[in-house]
Every structure is written in C-alpha cells, then in structure tokens.
C-alpha cells in the first residue's frame, strides 16, 4: 500500500499534468462534485506545487497543496483509507 505522502505526490503530479485517469481511479464517488467545483480555480500551466500542511486523523488525512502556474491556488484535499488504499474524499479551495 502506498503511503499518504506517496499518494499526495501522485495527486499533485496528476493535477500538474491534467491526468484525468488518475483522478477517476483515486477519487471516492462523493468527491467528484467537489472536484468539479474547484476546477475553475486550479491554475493553468502549473509549474510548481508545494505541500503546505498535512494533518492525519486516524484513517483520514487533510492535506493543503499550493499550485503555482499562470495563477496560484491552495487546495485542501481530504483523504480516507478505503480497503487499505488512500482515496480522496473531498476538496475545498482555500484561496
């Protein structure tokens, strides 16, 4: 099983590379609507990302990542372990 740190790196790289396939297999169904709501704030042409904060809470974890491209955004993702694998359960735009 991949660690939460590994999964967060995968998520950031998938966001940077616009890898829709990664999101289709790593989001819980209830996260799809939240994902669609944050798409407008995700910077275009992401050049860098930085994990700002990670708060583990049992089988859940909240992670804040700053993405920088044409603009900048901080996105909080909530992760849960499902069947031993970390999956994204929710998203929120921090700014």
Image (cartoon, helix red, strand yellow):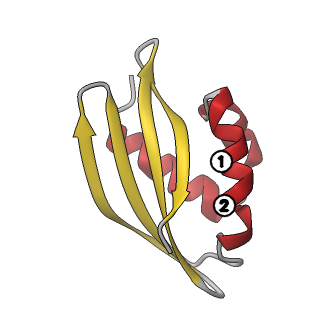
Residue 17: image x %, image y %?
68, 61
Residue 3: image x %, image y %?
33, 34
Q: Secondary structure at mark 2?
A: helix
Question: Which residue is denoted by mark 1 in the rendering?
Answer: 34
Q: Is residue 47 left or right of residue 86?
A: right
Q: Is residue 65 left or right of residue 92?
A: left
- 8 vs 93, nearest the viewer: 93
Q: Check the image and name the residue furthest to the top.
A: 83
Tell me the residue at 61%/29% (across/down): 28
- Give residue 23's quadrant in the image: top right
Question: Which residue is denoted by mark 2 in the rendering?
Answer: 38
- 57 vs 6, nearest the viewer: 57
80 vs 83: above or below? below
Disc 2 packing (10 Å; few <14; some 14–19; many ≥20)? some
- 9 vs 32, nearest the viewer: 32
Residue 13: image x %, image y %?
56, 57
Q: Check the image and name the residue furthest to the bottom.
A: 70
81 vs 57: above or below? above
25 vs 32: above or below? above
Tell me the residue at 54%/42% (across/down): 90
Tell me the residue at 53%/37% (across/down): 88
Tell me the number on the disc at residue 13.
Answer: none
Q: CA distance from mark 1 to mark 2?
A: 7 Å
- Give residue 68's quadrant in the image: bottom right
Do residues under tags 1 and 2 come within 8 Å of each other at their CB atoms? yes
Residue 36: image x %, image y %?
74, 52
Tell me the residue at 72%/62% (across/down): 39
Q: Pick the quarter of the image with the N terminus.
A: top left
């Amino acid at each position: 099983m991949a660690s939460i740190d590994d999964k967060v790196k995968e998520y950031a790289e998938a966001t940077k590379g616009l890898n829709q396939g990664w999101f289709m297999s790593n989001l819980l169904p209830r996260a799809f609507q939240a994902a669609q709501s944050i798409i407008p704030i995700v910077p275009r042409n992401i050049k860098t990302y930085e994990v700002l904060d990670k708060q583990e809470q049992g089988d859940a974890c909240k992670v804040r990542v700053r993405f920088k491209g044409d603009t900048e955004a901080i996105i909080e993702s909530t992760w849960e372990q499902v069947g031993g694998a970390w999956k994204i359960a929710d998203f929120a735009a921090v700014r």
